[in-house]
Amino acid sequence: MTTLSHRVLNRALLDRQFLLRRTDHTPLEVIERLVAVQAQEPNWAHVGLWSRIHDFTHAQLTALLEDRRVVRSGLLRSTQHLAAADDFRRLRPVLQPVLDRTAGTPHFTRNNAGLDLAAEGLDLLAGRTLSRKELARRLAERHPGRDGRILAGEVELRLPLVHGAATGAWGSWGNRSAVSVTPAEAWLGQPMATAGSAKELIRRYLAAFGPAGVKDVQAWSGLTRLAEVVAEMRPELRCHTGPGGEELFDLADAELPDPETPAPVRLLPAFDNALLGHADRTRIISDEDRRRVMPGQARVLPTFLVDGRVHGTWSLDGATLRLNPFRPVSPTDWAALEQEADRLLNFVRG
């Protein structure tokens, strides 16, 4: 087995994430390659696609959502993602145990005793779209004394519901109460897959994040006990040894770029896929910087890359984009960062 350095893994990740060079692929093709794009706050997903695609515009993603070719819903790790419609139909059933596990935590169970919220959700949403607020109100009316918002949150976890197109549009930042939900099968006009394939999910993951280990794909997806699945797939995979001696897997035909390939500066949004795709994230961020970028379980700050690695964070303050480096930046890299920041500001204003 080939031993891979952190730099090889870094360049492989950047290449597969379209961060070594922007791509001319369509936004739909990029979303499909990435499997799903983190979208807790919809604006961040737009920035993530901008950082990867030549001449990406807000209108391109809006059109995909309005045409129902891309949907926003709970998916990986029970968090909100954008996914191609066909991928959602096939992969949501694979990931349902993750969402069910979340629905089984005390936050939900102390409020749902004796209820079948999947059945109630289907009844309330039959033939209609409801806002989260309205769904919560109707559930609270049915069950006085219980928190309707928590009940509605569990319905979203238990059922494959998708959000209305406006939810993923640029400018819908933080307006969670206005999110509308409807059953995916009604929205897409096609049934969900009856049985998903964990092997397909692993192949798709490796195409976007490999080479990687079992713990990495589990951290990315939220699924557990994937070692047996990967063991069954071993004949079709290429095996490597990681920098710490760990076993890493990749698609048999996957190519690894030259580790000396130059990596341009990049500004990444909060919760970017490239930072959340592995259990061991040292291929792109040091453990020390990870604590700065991810100060709490539910926070991942916007970052910028220098030579392919996280070098600091950035923030928007009105019409000003502020760069916060963790260590000195060369004049050449700083000039490149300022140019990239100016381009991002133009995109944000657009």
Image (cartoon, grey):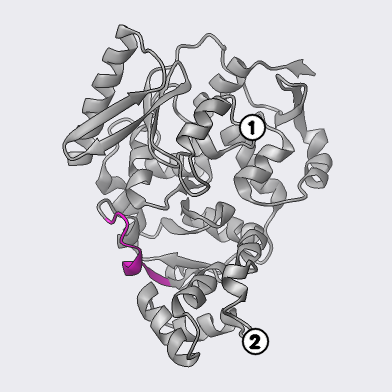
Checking the image for residue 280, the label placed there is: 1
Image location of residue 120, percent across then percent down: 54, 85
Left of 294 or right of it: where is 265? left
Relative to 131, does residue 89 appear above or below in the rendering?
A: above
Amino acid at dot 1? Asp
Image location of residue 265, percent across then percent down: 37, 20
**Residue bearing mark 2:** 114
Q: Secondary structure at mark 2?
A: loop
Residue 279: image quadrant is top right
Residue beneath the point at 35% across and 63% down: 176
Q: Nearer the viewer, residue 317 or 337?
A: 317
Magenta segment boundaries in residue numbering: 172-181
Q: Is residue 177 magenta?
A: yes
Instruction: Give how far apart the Cα atoms at labels 2 and 1 are.
Output: 40 Å
Relative to 328, does residue 284 appear above or below in the rendering?
A: below
Residue beneath the point at 51% across and 55% down: 79
